[in-house]
Amino acid sequence: MGAESALDERQLVREAQAGSGAAMAQLYSAHWRFAYRAAYLVVHDATAAEDIAQDAFLAAVDALDRFDRRRPFAPWLHRIVVNRALDWARREALRRKVDRPESVFEPLPPPAEIGGELMAALKELPAEQRAVVVLRHLLEYTPGEIAGMLDLPRGTVNSRLRRGLDRLREAVQDEASAEGVR
Amino acid sequence: MRRDPLGQALREATIPVPAEAEERGLRVVEAAYAHRQPRGRPVALPRLALAFAVATLLTALLLSPAGATVREWVDDVVTTSAPRPEPELAEIPGGGRLLVQSAAGPWVVQPDGSRRLLGDYEEATWSPRGLFVAAVQGRTLSAVEPDGDPRWSVTAARRVADPRWAPGGERIAYRSGQALRVVAGDGTGDRLLARSTAPVAPAWSPLGDAALAYVSSAGMLRIVHSEDGGDFAIGLAGTSVDEIEWGDGGATILEKSPGALRLQPVRLSKLQARPGIGDRRDLPVPAGATVVDAALAPERQLVAAVLTLWRDHGTRSAVILFDPEQARARRLLTVPGSLGQVAWSPDGRRLLVAWPGANQWLFLPIGRGQGRAVANVSRAFAPGGRAASFPRVEGWCCRR
């Protein structure tokens, strides 16, 4: 985010704290897509991702008056999104262990038109590795920032990132070649 | 700047986005924002006036008979005793039929007290006129006649729970795993309504079979169309809600959690334009009390609640009748120990209150008249009369 847009965002947060519903709606519109995408890439369930994104914004509304507006809004929101997505993924994994493996849910849409192999490979990673990959490469946080967001030692973040990337590399390289991305 | 092919791929990958998800979320966030309580900011003059008005109202409430009743109750001693118990259930006071879930399965109890075990089912619920019972066993939902004959069954992929028959009789909603599903009353057309729900039984609108309320896994109270799952209305559910009930002629949803009772007004006429859920209202549950169970009266905005109050000198329980319209709360009974669930009679004139510690059911009139108590309840619902766990009342049938 550029300096100018960061200033705009602080202004929006200030106005939302002061009672401007329009400012709150602008913050929502500016961040929903990335919040949803981040949640989806961790949980790979569209309904859960919708709930998680919504839940994160509700948490943001709830804590709005306590928010330090000198700090950027996005990392605060992303921290909530990714931690809730991780909680959901862990609960789901536990439920799969004790429940039957079949799904009652309607099948997900057909494989993605873009990034299909990458998505399939990402889905095979443990949720903890997916979360750090998403935070590092989709949301562009540094390993130190990720460590703070997930309350983990930095070494743990680095090792999860390395293991996740090793497993993704082949899929990414194949797809990057196909899409002309170098 | 160094290009990050993985980042670009993650940003560009096609992912499924539920239809209108962003707009739906915005409506919810706007509603939450409109209801938030700002803290630590200067209070503008109009808000100061509003705060003063609220404070005045609260003071008036505390000094009013309703507030006084609740305050009195908090420090009450046991003054209203339970009626002397009869040794067995010879009739159901006020009539009607009961559906009772025991460890052996669900039982239908006739007005004369005679009873029949329906079969090896884990959970059951009445159809609206009591012609059938929807019963659950593992992943199977069945419709069973009150004499025990099964009519049809559907099998879900995951464990079935919380069946609820719609008031028109045409649909049954149930939970399977985390999903909410609906099947027609004849067992056909089983379909998914929502993928991710909280472990709370859904509640049908008493006005018909179109609208169904449930709590999503994200803690939202959603009212959806039972045909296609489309949203009618969305609002925030209270924290830790474990039970919802839609009553008061369709005008109110009662949310119960261990520490609170909340009334959520519903405006069905405005469903298409804006969320039809109004400003919720907390009932004055005394601090430190646990809400064990609560039930909305069939046709009125009257809430019966069983509360447990933890004291240094022992636990006490009370049955409280909240009348929000009149701003009154009335204590019907206080007993030592723990009471269990509460259910309204079909005519709304009596309550059935479970008292597991005394192995009794209490039938309490809400107006004038003597209450009645029945002892040895668990033994009555154990095949062969053996001792068993205390049974659960699944329903008292029927209004029509």
Image (cartoon, coloured by chain):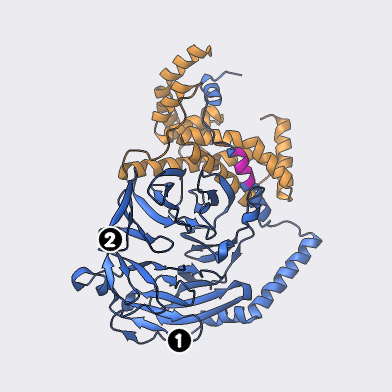
Chain colours: A orange, B blue
Q: CA distance from mark 2 to mark 1?
A: 40 Å
**Point 45% across, 71% down: residue:** B346
Spot the residue most to the right. B45
**Point 60% across, 72% down: residue:** B324
Nearer to us in this view, B87 or A152: B87
When the figure is inspected, residue A129 is found, relative to residue A17, above or below; the finding is above
Nearer to us in this view, A111 or B104: B104
Which chain is disc 1 placed on? B
Secondary structure state at the residue bearing disc 2: loop
Residue B248 at least partly seen: yes
- Marks 2/1 in contact by CB < 8 Å: the verdict is no
Residue named by callout 1: B80
Q: Percent position (x, y) of residue B373?
A: 36, 82
Boundaries of the magenta span? B22-27
Residue named by callout 2: B148
Q: Earlier in the sequence, mark 2 or mark 1?
A: 1
Q: Percent position (x, y) of residue B160?
A: 35, 50
Magenta region, mostly helix, strand or loop? Answer: helix
**Which of label 2 and label 1 is nearer to you?**
2
User: On the rendered image, what quadrant is the N terminus of chain B found in?
Assistant: top right
Q: Percent position (x, y) of residue B366?
A: 49, 80
Q: Percent position (x, y) of residue A78?
A: 56, 38
**Callout 2, which amino acid?**
Gly
* Residue A28 painted magenta: no
Q: Is residue B285 left or right of residue B128?
A: right
